[in-house]
């Protein structure tokens, strides 16, 4: 048999070596992650438990990983000082350390991969970790994801200002960081999440002015909410207005009578629903499917633990949070109600890229890219739907909605809901918009591999071995194309 030759342009054999290897890597130090780490270490495994909290203030300002809405105190800007209160707030970490679990707080997991299709050159499973100064790779035998769930956000007039936030983010600021800056809250939604959020807020000495529900009736019984909290069914937020510090009041409308009233508040908490944080699972290539009861696109798992990848397991809410069989239908009704109150031209769907709801439905580029061409101006969602079902990745490429540094955490679900309502179809049929590593918006200076292997560095510009890859687009197919082939020679280097 002839020996297989070595292609200097291929990446095979050049993958960077992990800085270390552990038997079990656990991502997420919530209750489920800590329990999984304890079980693994007590079973005799070497365990590394990583949690991104405390998150740097800059990332929190981008609403990563949760929808914080600018309602945190200045304390979060001193990340090093927040390590101690975060550690103290996460019950079980001390026990885990005593049991032999290695713990790293304030460390982000920005990607994870296992050998497989398209990754044949990867010698072993590996995860990418980072802090504010550097990134590194850790190899693992088994990965346990306990990334949790995040809030579903839906825009309305005035929501793109400080003071509009998610329920999970509020819980984190109150119970983990002790750094919430608001005092008077209005809660959107009337399910279990909204009720728990109201009880938590009142228990922490905050005032819940009202709970708003667009549907005619609340999803859970009134006695699930704290006494004295006004409950307004059949109402929708019309406008959040305020000043330099953000929200100061919320105007709501009775959807039957049209009567409006204004509620004084400094924070509006969206507690409409949760969705599993599946970004790492998507990057890993694990099987995902729309599972409305579990909050949307969730991992395919027979037991809430196993995944389609033998090296990867689940723990906690990342497997899905049971919100009833009509959870996605409920969200779509909310999106429909908010769209009906008007303001499409002003309502920003994607805050990072400043894409309005009207621009999304017109399939137009953001205004900062200038006026669209005549052909692009003639394009619209109706014409796009003539070619096939609505697809978030296609819309993202055409409008840039979801391409910002928050990586769609504020807009991903509401874009799907908006497209579904416009097409008069179920949001459950809208495909998941794909995730790409890095799943955290980290500076290139942190992600850069300064210690790149010399063999890889020598051929970085011809990894793909494509003849003519440096030929200007305008010269492809012309007589000038051969000129570039001659200039670069047979090895295609710059």
Image (cartoon, rainbow, N blue to C red):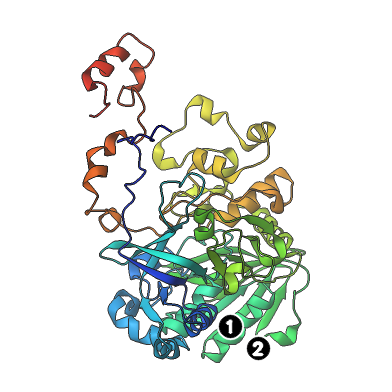
Query: On the image, which quarter does residue 19 sit in?
Result: bottom left
What distance separates the C-alpha of mark 2 from that of mark 1?
A: 9 Å
Q: Is residue 314 left or right of residue 296?
A: left
Tell me how many marks there are.
2
Give the vertical position of 471 relative to 269 (above or below).
above
* Mark toward the start of the polypeptide (2 vs 1): 1
Query: On the image, which quarter does residue 89 sit in?
Result: bottom left
Give the vertical position of 73 relative to 381 (above or below).
below
Mark 1 = which residue? 208
Q: Nearer the viewer, residue 93 or 463?
A: 463
> Is residue 150 at least partly visible in the picture?
no
Q: Is residue 464 left or right of residue 385?
A: left
Which structural element holds mark 2? loop
Give the vertical position of 218 relative to 2 (above or below).
below
Mark 2 = which residue? 226
> Is residue 224 at least partly visible in the picture?
yes
Q: Residue at x 54, y 74 (%)?
A: 168
Circle 2/circle 1 CB separation < 8 Å? yes
Other-residue count near label 1 (Cα within 10 Å), few / some / many at <14 / 14–19 / ≥20: many
Query: On the image, which quarter does residue 323 sit in?
Result: bottom right
Quadrant including the N terminus: top left
Which structural element holds mark 1? strand
Quadrant including the C terminus: top left
Label 2 or label 1, whichever lies nearer to me, is 2
Q: Residue at x 62, y 51 (%)?
A: 416
């Amino acid at each position: 048999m002839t020996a297989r030759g070595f292609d200097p342009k291929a990446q095979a054999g050049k993958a960077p070596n992990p800085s270390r290897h552990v038997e079990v890597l656990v991502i997420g130090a919530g209750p489920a992650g800590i329990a999984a780490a304890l079980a693994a270490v007590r079973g005799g495994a070497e365990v590394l438990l990583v949690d991104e909290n405390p998150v740097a203030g800059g990332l929190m300002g981008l609403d990563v990983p949760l929808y914080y809405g600018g309602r945190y105190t200045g304390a979060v800007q001193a990340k090093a000082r927040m390590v101690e209160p975060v550690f103290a707030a996460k019950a079980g970490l001390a026990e885990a350390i005593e049991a032999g679990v290695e713990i790293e707080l304030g460390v982000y997991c920005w990607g994870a991969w296992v050998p497989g299709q398209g990754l044949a050159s990867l010698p072993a499973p590996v995860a990418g970790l980072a802090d504010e100064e550097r990134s590194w790779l850790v190899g693992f035998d088994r990965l346990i994801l306990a990334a949790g769930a995040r809030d579903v956000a839906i825009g309305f007039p005035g929501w793109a200002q400080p003071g509009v936030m998610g329920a999970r983010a509020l819980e984190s600021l109150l119970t983990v960081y002790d750094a919430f800056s608001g005092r008077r809250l209005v809660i959107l939604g009337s399910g279990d999440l909204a009720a728990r959020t109201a009880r938590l807020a009142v228990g922490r000495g905050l005032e819940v002015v009202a709970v708003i529900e667009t549907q005619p009736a609340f999803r859970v019984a009134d006695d699930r909410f704290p006494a004295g909290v006004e409950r307004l069914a059949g109402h929708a937020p019309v406008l959040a207005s305020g000043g330099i510090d953000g929200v100061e009041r919320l105007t709501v409308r009775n959807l039957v009578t049209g009567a409006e009233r204004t509620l004084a508040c400094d924070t509006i908490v969206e507690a409409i629903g949760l969705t599993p944080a599946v970004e790492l699972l998507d990057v890993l290539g694990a099987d995902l499917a729309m599972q409305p009861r579990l909050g949307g696109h969730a991992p395919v798992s027979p037991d809430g633990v196993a995944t389609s990848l033998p090296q990867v397991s689940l723990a906690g809410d990342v497997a899905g949070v049971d919100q009833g069989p009509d959870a996605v239908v409920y969200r779509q009704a909310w999106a429909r109600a908010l769209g009906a109150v008007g303001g499409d031209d002003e309502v920003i769907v994607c805050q990072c890229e400043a894409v309005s709801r009207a621009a999304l439905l017109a399939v137009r580029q953001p205004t900062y890219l200038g006026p669209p061409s005549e052909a692009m101006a003639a394009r619209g969602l109706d014409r796009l739907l003539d070619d096939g079902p609505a697809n978030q990745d296609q819309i993202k490429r055409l409008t840039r909605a979801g391409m910002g540094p928050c990586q769609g955490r504020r807009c991903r679900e509401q874009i799907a809901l908006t497209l579904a309502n416009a097409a008069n179809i179920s949001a459950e049929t809208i495909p998941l918009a794909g995730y790409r590593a890095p799943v955290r918006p980290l500076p290139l200076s942190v992600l850069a591999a300064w210690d790149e292997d010399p063999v890889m560095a020598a051929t970085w510009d011809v990894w793909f071995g494509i003849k003519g890859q440096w030929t200007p687009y305008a010269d492809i197919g012309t007589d000038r194309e051969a000129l570039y082939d001659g200039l670069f020679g047979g090895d295609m280097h710059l």
